[in-house]
Image: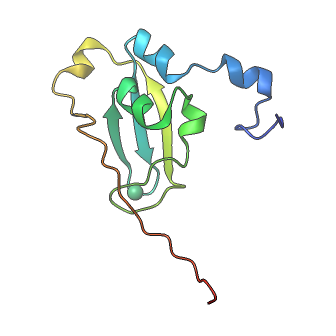
Amino acid sequence: MPAGHYGGLTYAQRNKVPRLSDAHEIGQFVRLDCAICKISRHYLPEDIQKLCGDVNAFQLRGQFRCERCGQKDSVSASFVTLLAREKVGLVIRRLERIEIKHVPIWRDVTL
Ligand SMILES: [Zn+2]
């Protein structure tokens, strides 16, 4: 596995970075921030894990598109611990369902 392709971290360092399952165990949330729109959304780690697997916050970079500006590069992910008072009234985006789209793939065939 090539080193240095993970936010500047080596393979050994990367394995020490907390993953979604770790964040779930200690009650953290996943926060996605768009640097352009200055908006943040909170998610439960287990919902994100259903989509992306048990990855860490660095590996979530580029996986999500901002719903407002449509950019992927501007969205960063982090695991956050919120105080009880910060959770009051907090809107969390929950995964309702995953839809699978069937996309036709065509190829030309010479007769
Ligand atoms: Zn945006």
User: Which quarter of the image is occupied by the N terminus?
Assistant: top right
Image coordinates for residue 51, horizontal then vertical, percent: 42, 37
Name which residue lies at 51% across and 75% down. Answer: 106
Image coordinates for residue 74, horizontal then vertical, percent: 50, 54
Residue 102 sits in quarter: bottom left
Q: Nearer the viewer, residue 32 or 84?
A: 32
**Quarter of the image where ligand 1 sits:** bottom left
Q: How is the image coloured?
A: rainbow
Residue lying at the far left in this picture: please name it. Answer: 89
**75 vs 104: above or below:** above
**85 vs 107: above or below:** above
Residue lying at the far top in this picture: please name it. Answer: 26
Residue lying at the far front in this picture: please name it. Answer: 111
Residue 58 sits in quarter: top right
Q: What is the total number of numbered labels drawn onto the structure image?
A: 0
Name which residue lies at 31% across and 14% down. Answer: 83
Residue lying at the far bottom in this picture: please name it. Answer: 111
**69 vs 54: above or below:** below
* Relative side of 1 to 60, left or right: right
Q: Nearer the viewer, residue 7 or 101?
A: 101
Image coordinates for residue 75, horizontal then vertical, percent: 48, 49
User: Which quarter of the image is occupied by the C terminus?
Assistant: bottom right
Image coordinates for residue 105, horizontal then vertical, percent: 49, 70
